[in-house]
Image (cartoon, helix red, strand yellow):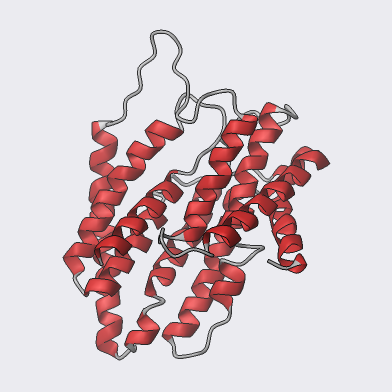
Amino acid sequence: MDILTIIAGFAGGAFGAAFGSIPAFILTGVFALIGSILTLSGVTDYIVGNVAFGPFFGPHVSFAAGAAAAAYAANKAKKLDNAQNVLASLFGINDIATILVGGIYGFVGIVAFTLITKQSVFVTDYPAFCVCIVLFLNRIILGKTSIIGTLNDGEKREIFPKVEIIQNSVNGFLLSLGIAIIGQKLIEAGVSKDAMAIYPVFAFGISALSLIFLQIGYSIPITHHVTYPAATVFILTQNIFLAAITGFINAILWVIAGRIFNSHCDTYIDPPAIVIAVSMFIINLIF
């Protein structure tokens, strides 16, 4: 890790805080789409690794830092009404300390990513895993609750909300089915096996970019924890239905992760990152 990478991590974290966690993540999706489309089209790509998941725009830097800075803005600076507001662009609260805190967490994200990628025993999606590291650490530092939240007397946590699980699992299954079929069509159209290796990033990019609708107020589903692992399974197995089952399971896990880590608490921990990190570890073990 050189000095320029360190500077980029700090700057990327400050960017994530200023622009907001989700807006920063949407831009990650834009670059992921551009790079993956280039590769699928047979053009050499330098964007995915260096930009979309690089030391500035990478979600382990800009997205995670933006979410962590929101906790500081709410819990310490008292200038944000909700510490879990990952839609908020924190530049507007006029607090330079919040932006600098984002920079510090961006630095933490790039350090975590550099360290974890030096080993090969634990294989998962490293940006997602590092998002988890940053936001778990943030809860310990800036939160007042436990890692899984703190229940007040008489409160109960509903981990398996039936209606929410049914809706998300069906959506996850159908979306993953569609992603896998599109992948099959690309193969039939003549896209090479080497080029198709980038297809999960293409699926991720679509999901990340779609969050622009969430940012402007539409209640769309969050899907990158579904599409990315499902597309990965499809590429590894060429089995459309295994991909769909992966999406089905991950959609359920997202609901459960949200109920465990994002209820009865005062900071944000990202359920999609948890699901991606866990599922990609399992996928790498199996396939």
Residue 12 position (above or below residue 187): above
Q: Is residue 277 above or below residue 82?
A: below
Residue at point 38%, 69% (across, down): 200
| Picture residue at 33% right of the left edge, 68% below the top | 232
Closer to us: 39 or 4: 4
Question: Residue 28 occupies which quadrant of the picture?
Answer: bottom right
Residue 34 drawn at (x, y percent): 53, 76
What x and y, as percent, mark residue 259? 38, 32
Q: Which quadrant would residue 165 be assigned to in this image? A: top left
Q: Does the image show residue 286?
A: yes
Residue at position x 50%, y 90% in the image: 43
The C terminus, quarter of image: bottom left
Whole-percent x and y of residue 269? 50, 39
The residue at the far top in this view is: 153
The quarter in which the N terminus is drawn is: bottom right
Residue nearest the viewer, comparing 205 with 105: 105
Q: Answer yes or no: is residue 223 visible.
A: no
Number of marks: 0
Viewer-side residue, 16 vs 147: 147
Q: Residue at x 27, y 73 (%)?
A: 236
Side of 233 relative to 212 (left or right)? left
Locate residue 114 relative to residue 246 in the image: left or right: right
